[in-house]
Amino acid sequence: MENTGYPCPGCGAPADLVAGCRGCGRPPYPPAAEVIRLDREITELAPRVEAARLAYHDLSGRLSTARQRRSALAARIRQEIPVPGAAGPAPLPAPPPRQIPQAPAPVRPGGAETSARAVQGLLFVLGGLLLGTAAVVFTAVAWATFGVTGRALVLLAVTALALAAPLVARARGLRGTAETLASVALLLVVLDGYAAWSVDLFGVTGLPGSRYAALVAAVSTAVAAGYALVSRLTAPWFAAWLLAQPVLPLAVAAFRPTAAGWALVLTAVALGDLAVVVALRRRTSGDSAASAAGLVLGWTGHGVALVLAAGCALVPLAVGHAAGTPLLAGGPLLLVALAAVAGAVAAAGRFWRATTTGLLAPVLAGALIRPVAELRSGLLLIAAGLVVAALAGAVRALPAPVRTGPLVGVLAVAAALGQVTVVLTGVVGAATASASFPAWQGGRDVPVPSWGWQLPAALLLTAGAVALLTPRAGRPLVGVIAAGLVALAAPAVTAVPWPLVLVVDLGAAAALLLAAVARPRPGRVVVPVAASAAAVLFGHALLVGVAPPGWCCCSWASPPGRTPRRVAASRGGSPGRRSARWRCRCWPRRPARPGRWCRRRRSGSGWPRC
C-alpha cells in the first residue's frame, strides 16, 4: 500500500498515512499504518521464501532421483532372483506411529502367575528331590535283597552314571538338568560311604563311627570340589561347602575334647568359612547370583560357628582353667575374638571392624585377669588396675583410624573397674564413719581388710586410664573425682587413729576447694563436682570426729578397793532378777558394757581405760 494522502475526517484537509493531518494535527489512521508495516515485512521475507522454495525443489529432485535409482536396483534384483507373486516396487516404510502412553492392562483371571524359567527351575528341584529320595530308599530298604557283590556293583554303576549324566546334559545346553543330576550324584557318593559301612567293606567298622563319618565327609568334599572344577557347574560347589562343615567336628569327636577343645575346633570351622568368603569376594567372573548365594552361606556358617565357639569358650573362663592350667583360661575366648576381628577385616566394613575390636578389649582384659583371680585372688584388685592401665596405653598408641573400637572397649572395662572401686570406697568410708556411732563408742579402730592397700592404687590406675582415653578437657574432672575417692579410701591401707582420718579428709576437701577457686578458667562441670567432693569429705570428717577425746570407757572391772556388786536390770528385768553386768565407772546408774564409751566425761578419779 502506497503512502498516499486521504481527506482528514475532521477538517477535510489532505492528510498523510504516516504523518497524519497537517491542518488540525489529527493522528494517522491506525489500520493504514499497520498495513504499511506489514508491506515492509513482506518485502523483507520474500527473498527468504524464494530461497526456501528453491531448496525444496532441489531436495525434491534429489528424492525423485533416489527413488528412481532404487526402483532400477529392485528391478535388477527381481530379474536375477525371481520372487513368486506379483512383482512391483516395494512401498516406502511408513513412519513409526506416535507412542501414546497407555495405562497397564488389568491382570486377567487365569493369566500367567510366574515365568516359564521359574516353573522349569521348580520342576528341576522337585525332580532332584524325588531322585534323592529314591536313592535313599534303595540304599536303606532294597539293599537287603542283593548280595554284597551285587550291592557294590549296583551302587557303583548308578553313581558312575549319575556323575556322567550332568556332563552330557551340560554339553547339550541343559544346564538346569545338569545341576539337578549333579546334586543327586553327589548324594549317591555319600550313600556309597554308608553302604561301605553297612557291609563292613575293607573292615571299616573297626574305626569309630564319628571318625569314619568324618572320612566319608572329607572324601565327598574332595569329590564334589573336583567334580565342580571338571563340570563347571554351581551345585557341586555348594555341596562341597555343605559336606566340609562337619569334617573337623566329627574327626575330633572321638577324642572327647573339653569345652576349650570344642571352642578351638569351631573357631577353625569359622576360619574355613571365612576363607570361602574371601575366595568368593576375589572372584571376578562367573554367575553373580551363585556368588551372592555363596557369600550368604559363607557368612552364615562363619557367624554360627563363632557363636557356638564363644559359648564353648565361656566355660573354661568361668571354670578358671583350660588345658590343665589357669594361665590359659581365657585363651579360647581370645582366639574366638581374634577370629571375629579377622571376619570384620575381611568384610571391609568400618562398623563391624569397630564393633569386633571393641569386644576384643574386654575379652583380652578377662583373659589376663582370670589367671590372677585363680592363682592370686588377694591381688585381684591391683592386677585389674594394672591391666586397665596397660590396655589404655596400648590403645593410646594405636593410629587414629583404628582407635575408635578399642577405645570404647577399654573405656567399658575401665568403667566396670571404676564401679567396683567406687563401691568398695563407699564401704570403707561408711565403715570409718560408723565407728563413731553411737557417740559413746567414738574412736574405735576399724578392722583393715586384706585388700585395702590395693584400693587407692586401683583408683589411681583407673583414673589414669580414663584420663588417657578421654579428651584433654575432661581430665580435670577425672582428677577431681579420683582425689576425693582416694581420700575416702586412704583409711583402708592401714589402721590409723581417727584424728589422722579427720586431717586427711579436711586437707583433701580444702585442696579441692582451693583448686576449684584458683583455677584460671573454671569449668562449668569441674567446679560443681569439686565442691560436691569437698562437701562429701567435710561430712565424712564430721561423722568421724563426732566423739571427742577424753570420754571414759566402761569395763567389767570394779573400782580399786571396792567389791563388785550386781544391780537389777534397768529394762525388761524382774525386781528379783539380777543382771550379770556391772555398773559403769563414770555413770553408776548405767549398766556397764565392755569396750563402750560413756556419755559422761571421765572424772579425776583415775579410772583405767579399756
Image (spheres, helix red, strand yellow):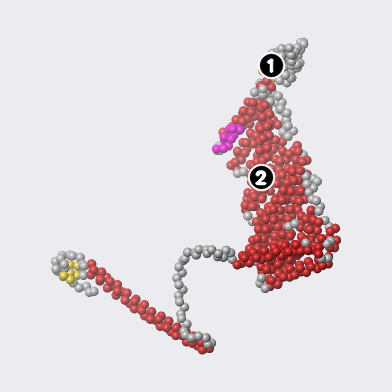
Q: From the viewer's perspective, is 24 left or right of 306? A: left
Specify whether 34 is left or right of 7.
right
- From where the camera sits, is residue 519 visible? no
Pick the front one: 414 or 155:
155
Helix or strand or loop: what does disc 1 sit on? loop
Q: Residue at x 68, y 29 (%)?
A: 431
Mark 2 Cα-neighbour bin, 10 Å: few <14, some 14–19, many ≥20 = many
Nearest to the observer: residue 460 or residue 536: 536
Q: Are marks 2 and 1 in contact (CB under 8 Å)?
A: no
Q: Position of residue 74 (x, y in %)?
A: 49, 85
Whether residue 158 is visible: yes
Kindly identify the residue that appears in the image at 72 percent across and 56 percent down: 271
- In this view, the residue farthest toward the front is 145
Tell me where the magenta segment starts and ends, as one range.
Answer: 524-534
Q: Residue at x 78, y 61 (%)?
A: 140
Q: Secondary structure at mark 2?
A: helix
Q: Quadrant of the C terminus?
A: top right
Mark 2 residue type: Val
Question: Which residue in the protein does label 2 denote?
Answer: 410
Image quadrant holding the N terminus, namely bottom left
Taking depth in this image into account, of 588 and 211 the one nearest to the observer is 211
Choose the circle earlier in sequence order: 2 or 1. Answer: 2
In the image, is residue 542 above or below residue 55?
above
Identify which amino acid the numbered label 1 is placed on.
Arg
On residue 537, the disc is none
Q: Where residue 397 appears, x then y in whole percent?
A: 66, 48
Viewer-nearest of discs 2 and 1? 1
Check disc 1: other Cα within 10 Å, few if <14, some if 14-19, many if 20+. Answer: few
Kindly identify which residue carries mark 1: 571
Q: Provide residue 367's location: percent of width, then percent of height.
A: 73, 45
